[in-house]
Image (cartoon, rainbow, N blue to C red):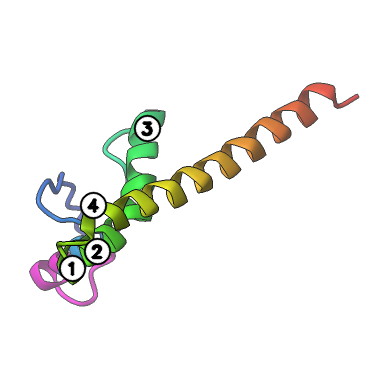
Amino acid sequence: MNVTVTYHDRDAFTVDEIIATAKRNYGSNAHITVSPESAKPKDFLYFALQGLITHEQISLFFNDKNTYTAELQKLRKEVLETIREVMDTVIIDNETKLTKD
C-alpha cells in the first residue's frame, strides 16, 4: 500500500534533519522529498539560500560565538558571490536565447 504524507516543517533547520525525522516517524523505507513551500520563485530562492547557508551558519554559531558576527559576514559575501555568478549565467543564457537565429 502506498501512502503519501505532506506537511510543512517549520521547526527543522535543514533538509537532512527533516528526512531523518520523517524516517524515524515513517520507517527507514520511506521515500522523502523536501521542496519549497510553493512554486513561487521567492520560495525557491529561500529554499536554495537555506540550503547554501544553514549548515555553515549553525557551525559558525556553535564553534565560536565571539567570532560569529565576523564569520557570518564572510559567509554572506561568499553566498552573494555565488548568487551573482548564477544570476550572470541566467542573464547570459537568456541573451543567447534572445539572439538565437
Separation (CA) of disc 4 from disc 1: 10 Å
User: Marks 2 and 1: which is nearer the front?
Assistant: 1
22 lies above or below 81: below
Residue 17 in picture, x, y percent from top left: 19, 64
Q: Earlier in the sequence, mark 1 or mark 3?
A: 3
- Tell me which amino acid carries mark 2: Leu
Q: Do the CB atoms of the residues marked 2 and 1 lie less than 8 Å apart?
A: yes
Q: Badge 3 is on which residue?
A: 39
- Tell me which amino acid carries mark 3: Ala
**For residue 60, which numbered disc appears in the image?**
2
**For residue 21, which numbered disc appears in the image?**
none
Rendering quarter of residue 13: bottom left
Q: Earlier in the sequence, mark 2 or mark 4?
A: 2
- Tell me which amino acid carries mark 4: Thr
Separation (CA) of disc 2 from disc 4: 9 Å
Q: Badge 4 is on which residue?
A: 69
Please name whichever residue, 83 or 38, is drawn nearer the observer in this view of the structure.
83
- Tell me which amino acid carries mark 1: Asp
Q: Badge 1 is on which residue?
A: 64
For disc 1, the neighbor class at 10 Å (few under 14, some 14 to 19, many from 20) is few
33 lies above or below 89: below
User: Marks 2 and 4: which is nearer the front?
Assistant: 4
Mark yes or no: residue 15 visible: yes
Separation (CA) of disc 3 from disc 2: 31 Å
Residue 29 lies in the magenta stretch: yes
Q: Residue furthest right?
A: 101
Q: Do the CB atoms of the residues marked 3 and 4 lie less than 8 Å apart?
A: no
Residue 24 in picture, x, y percent from top left: 11, 72
Which residue sits at x=36%, y=30%?
42
6 lies above or below 54: above
| Span colored in magenta | 21-33
